[in-house]
Image: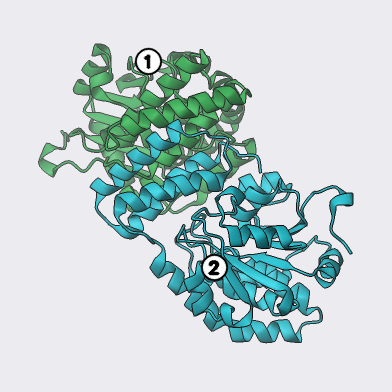
Chain colours: A cyan, B green
Amino acid sequence: MKTYFDCIPCFVRQSLDSVRMVTSDEEIHEHLLREVLQALGKMDLRQSPPVMAQQIHRIIRALTGRSDPYHDMKDQSNRLAMNLYPELKKRVERSADPLETAVRLAIAGNVIDMGINSHLTDEQVHEAIAHALEAPFDADLEVFRRSISDAENILYLADNAGEIVFDKLLIEQLPLEKITVAVKGSPILNDATMDDAESTGLCELVKVIDNGSDAPGTILDDCNKTFRQHFDQADVIISKGQGNYETLSDVKKNIFFILKAKCFVIAKNLGCEVGSLILQKSGLPASAVQVK
Amino acid sequence: MKTYFDCIPCFVRQSLDSVRMVTSDEEIHEHLLREVLQALGKMDLRQSPPVMAQQIHRIIRALTGRSDPYHDMKDQSNRLAMNLYPELKKRVERSADPLETAVRLAIAGNVIDMGINSHLTDEQVHEAIAHALEAPFDADLEVFRRSISDAENILYLADNAGEIVFDKLLIEQLPLEKITVAVKGSPILNDATMDDAESTGLCELVKVIDNGSDAPGTILDDCNKTFRQHFDQADVIISKGQGNYETLSDVKKNIFFILKAKCFVIAKNLGCEVGSLILQKSGLPASAVQVK
């Protein structure tokens, strides 16, 4: 995705959010802000947002000495989502179209994004679920259904902790033997890592790998060999969240982007309203679509 | 006012807003962002917001070669407010308490603040008027009324273009012979300058001076001698808007701050909700209050 300069003030806000989670010492806040501002001032401002966020959060971790500032919030999100899971699973199974309901819920889970809102309340998660189940959903589910059915290897790119429990609801509606889920290689924002996949039972359901990267998206050149092999071999990729969209929207693969458009920058890029539910196939030429 | 680091991302956003008004050339946007980020990275981040904004907008003007990026928007705001003026004046005169109605409308006019919202629509101005006339208003108007009546010299610190037409409605309810209005010395954001005071007829009503400064607030050390004399001699100061509050809230003078709390930082400082109508006397010790 083309980068918008509007992301720059948002990075500064995000940095402040992060450091405040770790310490209330205003000297450290100021020091961090200064470092981040100077780093941004020298960065190529046209890189995709996750490339820049990766560099910024490395500064935050180095300066605060905390390798995982969002650790407690990730645990909390996982617990919240696990508590909701049994009821949501029933909801999926009893619905007229379980796949559609599961996609809608996977999108609802995408609201758990501490890069956008680090003060997310349980109530907001409940509201996101209610909204996702009722909101207009302008997606070609049949193309998604057919691609899933035709695929041999499906790579599911997870996004955030907590959200991966919502992903589990969707993954359960897919052919499990074809699925590999990829999480991040190490902590970045509240993105899901292997710890989250294990604690939420995802690893018992499907094969889970990590991508070896600490970017809040999928920067292919930054990913490990195992991930690259899975990515290359997959005939369908399911990409969750804004960060994965921002880094993969121009990649020539058969990708279904599933996300909630949570800020005006991404909404503008997708040509939708903020808050829209998105299931969008990558815009590769028809001849390149891997349909068997 | 104590500075909050939350203002820093807002400065970056404001810079982008400003440069986009002047040019659609993304090379210049990037250049400007980079300059502003680097400057902020070196600045004392504990200075009051207007001190920092003054430095940032000097960079913007130097880099774009435009001494007054908000010129057209200021003209537009003045025209909009002048069109509303006759109807609003009737409204003040016919109300049970013309001073209260005029204060409420002066607060409504404070919504015309391009530092906060450079995409303000006419509809939002109308909404602000309707809100200000109806909203709860937890102010001691009698103290204000008595101070005005007892004062010999009243200095009215104007805030923005367009807004000064709303100020005119309030000034008309005050003893005109006691009033001096101060505008900014040169363009900064959409703050009112002498041009705006002249084009909206304020200069025909009362004495208007400029403060000699290009800060979006009142930094006393940066103001000219004439302004300083008026400031020192005034026994009541009426201070409009956030910028003047941010720079004068700790100054030991008899100041009435009139504003709309438009962002969460100022609301937090004032201990109110965002959107509240504020008429607040400066918190100086009772013995220092100049009541005759």
Compare residues B19 and B291 and report the one nearer the observer.
Answer: B19
Secondary structure found at label 1? loop
- Residue underneath mark 2: A124
Height in image: A214 above or below B27? below
Pick the front one: B52 or B113 = B52
- Position of B230 relative to A284 (above/below): above
Chain on which label 2 sits: A
Where residue A160 appears, x then y in whole percent? 54, 65
Residue under the image location 70 percent in, 73 percent down: A179
The residue wearing badge 1 is B185
Q: On what subunit does the disc labeled 1 rest? A: B
Relative to A231, say whether B228 is above or below: above
Which amino acid does the dot numbered 1 rest on? Gly
Q: Could you say where residue B14 lies in the image, as x and y percent from the top left?
A: 48, 33
Q: Quadrant of the C terminus of chain A?
A: bottom right
Above or below residue B21? Residue B112 is: below
Q: Residue at x 27, y 40 (%)?
A: B1
Occupied quadrant, residue B290: top left
Q: Indicate the secondary structure of the residue bearing disc 2.
A: helix
Q: At which x and y percent is residue A22?
A: 32, 59
Task: Say left or right for B77 vs B183.
Answer: right
The image position of residue A196, as x and y in percent, is: 50, 72
Badge 1: residue crowd in 10 Å (few <14, some 14–19, many ≥20):
some
Quarter of the view holding residue B122: top right
Q: Residue at x 69, y 83 (%)?
A: A91
Q: Is residue B32 visible?
A: yes
Crowdedness near tag 2: few (<14), some (14–19) or many (≥20) residues, C-alpha within 10 Å: few
Amino acid marked by disc 2: Gln
Give the camera-side residue of A147 and A264: A147
